[in-house]
Image (tube, rainbow, N blue to C red):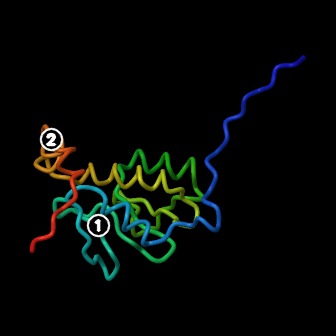
Amino acid sequence: MAARKKTVAKPKPAKRGSRLTVDDVRELALALPATEERPSYGTPGFRVSDTLFARVLDEDSIVIKVDFDHREALLRTQPDIFRVTPHYQDWPMVIVQLTTVGRPLLQSLLKEAWRRCASPKVLKALEAPGAAAKKAAPRKKRV
């Protein structure tokens, strides 16, 4: 009996019905500590330590901060999800198609972009003992 070859499956694009939306991006971005949403060029932008790490371009795409090497790898391996326009060519940003990206990948990219932009003070606060407990505790409303 011949041995079967293992094949490595490429990540599948999101199913049409499970397409991510701007609201999904907002939910994922604002779940990151010390993140705030502010308009950027007329669309929602997400910042940490007053530094933009992601912003909505339109209903079908967002732009996320990445380093140039990572961007090249993303463009080469998943061109159906990632692209760069001439405007972003010289900036460490990549355009992400919400119509094809999966939620876990988008969440990972947002976390990485957040970490690249967070100030040392914000990062240090996360590493402090009890930071996880503080983050998990629900905020109390003032009466």
Tell me if mark 2 has few (under 14), some (14-19) or many (20+) residues whose alpha carbon lies within 10 angstroms of its own.
few
Q: Position of residue 86 (x, y in %)?
A: 44, 68
Q: Earlier in the sequence, mark 1 or mark 2?
A: 1
In terms of secondary structure, where does tag 2 sit?
Answer: loop
Give the residue at mark 1: 46
Q: Which residue is rendered at x = 44% and y = 72% of the image? A: 22
What is the distance, in whole Å, between disc 1 and disc 2 at their CAs? 26 Å
Query: Residue farthest to the bottom?
Result: 42
Q: Position of residue 25 (x, y in %)?
A: 41, 66
Three-letter amino acid code of the residue under disc 2: Gly
Q: Which residue is rendered at x = 15% and y = 41% of the image? A: 130
Query: Residue farthest to the top?
Result: 1
Query: Residue farthest to the right?
Result: 1
Q: Position of residue 102 (x, y in %)?
A: 54, 56
Give the residue at mark 2: 130
In terms of secondary structure, where does tag 1 sit?
Answer: strand
Which mark's residue is nearer the viewer, 1 or 2? 2
**Quadrant showing the C terminus:** bottom left
Pick the front one: 57 or 59: 59
